[in-house]
């Protein structure tokens, strides 16, 4: 790997002296040193920004970016030090790490850390409030420690413990698990690197700050969440309904559910949803969640019919031309994984989640089929795989060698990140010079429309896309140009003066 990286310095130089200078610069700025933190001993890595180096560093267990130190931190133990030596033979170690690098681990001041359990920390935003999500797993001791952290509360929809996203709370988490578990906060630190802070202008807002959910309503929300899980609703529906109910209860200032009336729902609809300009889909989601909660949990009905529901918007699907799809996929020429992902979405009309959930066993190249399991509506379906797509997937597999999922992230066996896939799409749209707000779902719409324009019947398209209703598939007839382009405008028949 180091040999490849050093080519970066070879290219600009055209004489021997310049090459020597470039190599000296490389060796001087690639350094490792020992750092002692509250949550353990770490190796600090400092090197010039290079995606290939970062990709390798991220593959080490427990590695994360320390924004304050402007360095990558990796747990300090004998195994990782040996891996570092193997991956970066010319990496310069400081005095505190030289004993290992000289192959004498018995005299090293660094003691290998014992095997520990891992606690994953991610982050989210609820009603514009930023939270950290602690996922302790199933170990009773680790769960007990999580419960003891001041300010942490369990959120069933996210299957983790929420605590406000503050630097002092993050330090509190590291301190609580010190000696018991490794804290994997990669998702927290990485987002800070990808999204630098931008100074925003202060804009007056009509939205009011809602009180925290009280214990009684929080318990009812947990019971409702468990009921939704037992009925096998999707995880997205679970999250949407619990978030909607939480906002409703907080708006009513934690009013007992037995005292909530139809007027409360009318006020919430008019004075919170409509006044704050929330979308029609959010309005419908909240009403559906409240209706289901009172019917199943409270055994009574609110008069939902008296609530003014928004009329559904009838928007046409966004479609790219064949030429635009070509430019988009050609923009991935330097990365076979990106090309395979975008090509598969278009060539099979996949949703984002369907692509990321694909496993190696779902590709049946002998029969030319792709098996999509447990898709929207808990349904399985099959899609035809073209010969060109199969060849592309084989070439991708030979190079990347995924283990479980067809497309995996930086760690083998883990699914590729939805956020990373969105970033790939944005980058390719820009490189393809497409001046439209293109999303991944546009490729699915484009696939269906292009099939229709090629003469495929609607019933077949419905099956391939996995639509429950034929009315959903019929929307593509409104954007297909096959018949529209045959229409002759009466303007062409007018005899106008030149």
Image: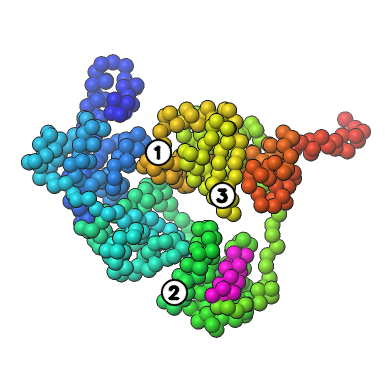
Q: Residue at x 54, y 64 (%)?
A: 231
Lateral position of residue 289 relative to residue 306, left or right: left
Check residue 219 in the rendering and tell me which mark sits there, or answer none: 2
Disc with the residue nearer the chain's start (1 vs 2): 2
Q: Is residue 251 visible?
A: no
Q: Secondary structure at mark 1?
A: loop
- The question of residue 63 being in magenta is answered with no
Q: Which residue is mark 1?
A: 403
Sequence-earlier tag: 2 or 3: 2
Give the label on residue 375, or none: 3
Q: How is the image coloured?
A: rainbow
> Spatial distance from mark 2 to mark 3, Cα to Cα?
31 Å
The N terminus - image quarter: top left
- Residue 17 in view, yes or no: yes
Magenta region includes residue 284: yes
Q: Position of residue 452 (x, y in %)?
A: 72, 38
User: Which x, y percent locates residue 268?
Assistant: 58, 74
Q: Give, as a single range, the part of the protein colored magenta.
A: 283-297
Q: Residue at x 74, y 45 (%)?
A: 478
């Amino acid at each position: 790997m180091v040999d490849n990286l050093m080519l970066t310095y070879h290219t600009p130089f055209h004489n021997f002296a310049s090459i020597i200078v470039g190599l000296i610069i490389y060796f001087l700025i690639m350094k490792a040193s020992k750092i002692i933190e509250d949550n353990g001993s770490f190796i600090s890595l400092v090197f010039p920004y290079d995606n290939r180096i970062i990709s390798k560093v991220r593959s080490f267990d427990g590695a994360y970016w320390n924004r304050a130190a402007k360095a990558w931190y990796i747990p300090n133990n004998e195994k990782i030090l040996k891996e570092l030596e193997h991956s970066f033979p010319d990496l310069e170690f400081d005095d505190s790490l030289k004993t290992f690098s000289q192959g004498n681990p018995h005299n090293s001041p660094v003691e290998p850390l014992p095997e520990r359990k891992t606690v994953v920390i991610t982050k989210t935003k609820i009603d514009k409030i930023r939270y950290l999500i602690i996922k302790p797993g199933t170990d009773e001791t680790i769960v007990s420690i999580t419960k003891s952290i001041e300010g942490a509360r369990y959120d069933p929809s996210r299957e983790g413990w929420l605590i406000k996203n503050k630097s002092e709370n993050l330090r509190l988490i590291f301190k609580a698990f010190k000696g018991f578990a490794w804290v994997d906060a990669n998702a927290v630190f990485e987002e800070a690197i990808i999204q630098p802070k931008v100074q925003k202008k202060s804009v007056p807002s009509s939205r009011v700050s809602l009180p925290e959910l009280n214990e009684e309503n929080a318990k009812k929300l947990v019971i409702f969440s468990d009921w939704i899980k037992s009925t096998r609703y999707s995880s997205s529906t679970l999250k949407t309904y619990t978030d909607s109910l939480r906002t409703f209860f907080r708006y009513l200032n934690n009013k007992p559910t037995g005292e909530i009336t139809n007027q409360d729902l009318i006020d919430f609809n008019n004075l919170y949803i409509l006044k704050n300009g929330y979308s029609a889909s959010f309005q419908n989601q909240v009403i559906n969640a409240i209706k289901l909660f009172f019917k199943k949990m409270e055994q009574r009905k609110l008069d939902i019919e008296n609530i003014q529901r928004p009329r559904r918007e009838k928007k046409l699907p966004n479609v790219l031309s064949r030429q635009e799809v070509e430019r988009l996929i050609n923009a991935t020429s330097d990365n076979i994984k990106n090309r395979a992902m975008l090509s598969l979405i278009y060539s099979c009309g996949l949703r984002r989640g369907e692509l990321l959930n694909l496993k190696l066993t779902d590709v049946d190249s002998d029969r030319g089929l792709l098996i999509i399991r447990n898709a929207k509506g808990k349904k399985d379906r099959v899609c035809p795989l073209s010969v060109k797509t199969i060849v592309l997937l084989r070439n991708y597999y030979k190079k990347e060698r995924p283990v479980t999922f067809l497309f995996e992230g930086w760690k083998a066996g883990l699914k590729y990140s939805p956020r990373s896939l969105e970033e790939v799409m944005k980058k390719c749209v820009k490189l393809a010079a497409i001046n439209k707000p293109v999303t991944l779902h546009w490729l699915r719409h484009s696939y269906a429309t292009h099939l229709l324009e090629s003469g495929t019947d609607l019933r077949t398209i419905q099956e391939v896309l996995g639509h429950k209703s034929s009315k959903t598939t019929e929307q593509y007839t409104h954007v297909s140009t096959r018949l529209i382009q045959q229409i002759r405008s009466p303007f062409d028949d007018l005899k106008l003066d030149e």
